[in-house]
Image (cartoon, helix red, strand yellow):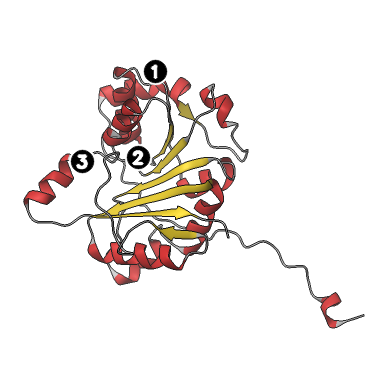
Amino acid sequence: MSDNDNKPEEQPKQMRRIRSFVKREGRMTQRQSNAKEQYLPTMGLTYEKKLLDLDAVFGRQAPRVLEVGFGMGKSLVEMAKNNPDYDYIGIEVHGPGVGACLADAAEAGITNLRVFEHDAVEVLADMIPDNSLSTFQLYFPDPWHKARHHKRRIVQPEFLACIHQKLVAGGIIHMATDWENYAEHMLLELTEAPGFENTSETQDYVPRPDWRPLTKFESRGHRLGHGVWDLIFKKVTK
């Protein structure tokens, strides 16, 4: 018997638990509260350790886009409205944002959007099937700008490996931030992540694509001379 026979069998590497947010639950308006009560049963998805059947969830086959941290949901609702042939899944931990998103989606008559009010890391690991997403979006995540907090940034190797599993071949991961240091961090992590290819001709950042709506916050930043960095990488199989 060799020495290797006595070694314990290696277990698959688990995604490290990233606490990338602090839940600051602001006051919920009556509109937001009513929307959650009325529309969560039809547009909401509940976390459980069970893979979703996305065709059953949306009642059709279509390209799927997932966004983590949609805030108040304005841009997510606009994208779903402008692209009815795509299905959208949004994940957000803050109740007021979920309520606002549901209210706007209902008023727009949108049927191709579902939302989670839960931790994105758990939803991705436990509920999103592999090779099921055409696009993954992460717009303006908390930059955790203090050096001692960088470990809380959601863009880490384990997280990117999980996203790679969830994307179809040729699927894209699109990130945007208004913090240059975080943009540099994103670029480094994505460049080093196996199975991704930068779509930028200069191998760094890309102009804001038409499908990402310009937010009021971003427009104000542009007027003040603040920068915004977009990154788009594609899943490649070698």
User: Which mark is in front, 2 or 3?
Assistant: 3
The quarter of the displayed image where residue 26 is located: top left
In this rendered view, identify the residue nearer to me: 164 or 224.
164
Q: Which of marks 1 and 2 precedes in the sequence?
A: 1
Amino acid type of the residue that numbered disc 2 sits on in the rendered structure: His
Nearer the observer: mark 1 or 3; the answer is 3
N-terminal of the pair, mark 1 or mark 3, is: 1
Q: CA distance from mark 2 to mark 1?
A: 17 Å
Amino acid type at circle 1 is Gln
Q: Nearer the viewer, residue 200 or 231?
A: 200
- Seen at 48% across and 34% down, the residue is 63
Find residue 214 and name its label.
3
Residue plotted at (17% across, 57% down): 227
Residue 213 percent coordinates (x, y): 24, 38
Distance in Å between CA atoms under marks 2 and 3: 22 Å
The answer to whether residue 167 is visible is yes
Q: Is residue 17 visible?
A: no
Question: Secondary structure under badge 1?
Answer: helix
Quickly name the residue at label 1.
Answer: 38
Q: Is residue 207 above or below residue 41?
A: below
Disc 2 designates what residue? 94
Labelled pair 2, 3 in contact (Cβ < 8 Å): no
SS at badge 2: loop
